[in-house]
Amino acid sequence: YVDGFYNARGGYAESGRVVGRLAEQAAAEGVEVQPSQTADEILMEGNRVQGVLTREGATFSADHTVLAAGSWTPWLLPELHSVMTTTGHPIFHLKPSDPSLYEAPGFVVYFADTSSTGWYGFPMLREGVVKVSRHGVGVTLHPEHDERKVYEEDFAQLRIFLEDTFPALLDAEITYTRRCVYNDTLDEHFWIDHHPEREGLSIATGGSGHGFKFGPVLGDLIADVVEGRPNEWADLFRWRDLSPDTAGQEASRYHGDAEGEA
């Protein structure tokens, strides 16, 4: 992939560190953060949501509940199993023999014709590794009970990509692998709306592999939906009926080749 488009304003953020910083900021603003609690059950009284029961036995009551549970959403709301699923996508950390080749600004965030291959990655991370990932079909898994392991076929596909694009990384040590977990809706659009049958409950989920990058604008959108204010994008992400054969609509995601290969 020798052709490209350079965006001088483009970049990346390390999602884990961002979420950690946001939690710190929320706590500093007076939000009560409960990192040791695991949501386990939506509490109902009649057709109205009263709050959440945790696996650890705590009860959190609320006048209005916003469920933003990502890949755990359909396990908390089984009625959504038919329109969303959890998939895992391979991530590799490679330690190059010549780190200078992959340092910013000389080496940038890249997308290797992502709609046709799924491959993308970042410049050298602070840990001294290059991240290479695939935004594609992935494998279906349970977000908690299944291993987030990378398979031999994933390694084989990585080598094919590196041979064509970054041959200097072919002999790099692979220091870490895992699967990045997506909460995929069938059409790959977000799912942000009031629950049509459970009063006092709003849903904000369905990241479908592109939720984090929209984080700076999703907060306002979710707040508008929850509080009933108009928003020009709300209708796109409303509660909707999807048939089992609904195809994903993200143009920059690899959906497999004509032979069905993932």
Image: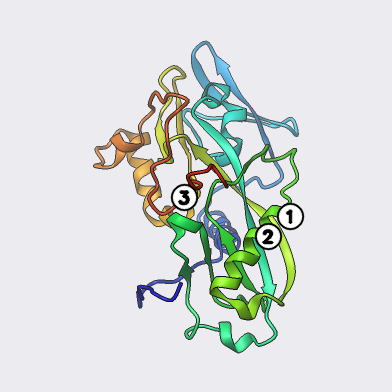
State if disc 3 and disc 1 touch (CB < 8 Å): no
The residue sitting at 34% across, 44% down in the picture is 221
Element type where label 2 sits in the image: helix
Q: Which mark is residue 156?
A: 2
The x, y position of residue 171, in whole percent, is 71, 77
The x, y position of residue 9, in whole percent, is 36, 74
Q: Which residue is mark 3?
A: 211
Q: Which mark is residue 152?
A: 1
Q: Is residue 186 above or below residue 261?
A: above
Element type where label 1 sits in the image: helix
Look at discs 2 and 3 and give the one toward the viewer: 2
Task: Indicate left or right for 72 with 188 as reference.
Answer: right
Residue type indicated by callout 2: Ala
Task: Indicate left or right for 33 with 118 as reference.
Answer: right
State if disc 1 and disc 2 touch (CB < 8 Å): yes
Element type where label 3 sits in the image: loop
Q: Quadrant of residue 38?
A: top right
Disc with the residue nearer the chain's start (1 vs 3): 1
The x, y position of residue 251, in whole percent, is 38, 50
State if disc 3 and disc 2 touch (CB < 8 Å): no
The residue sitting at 45% across, 51% down in the picture is 253
User: Is 90 in front, or is 209?
Assistant: 90
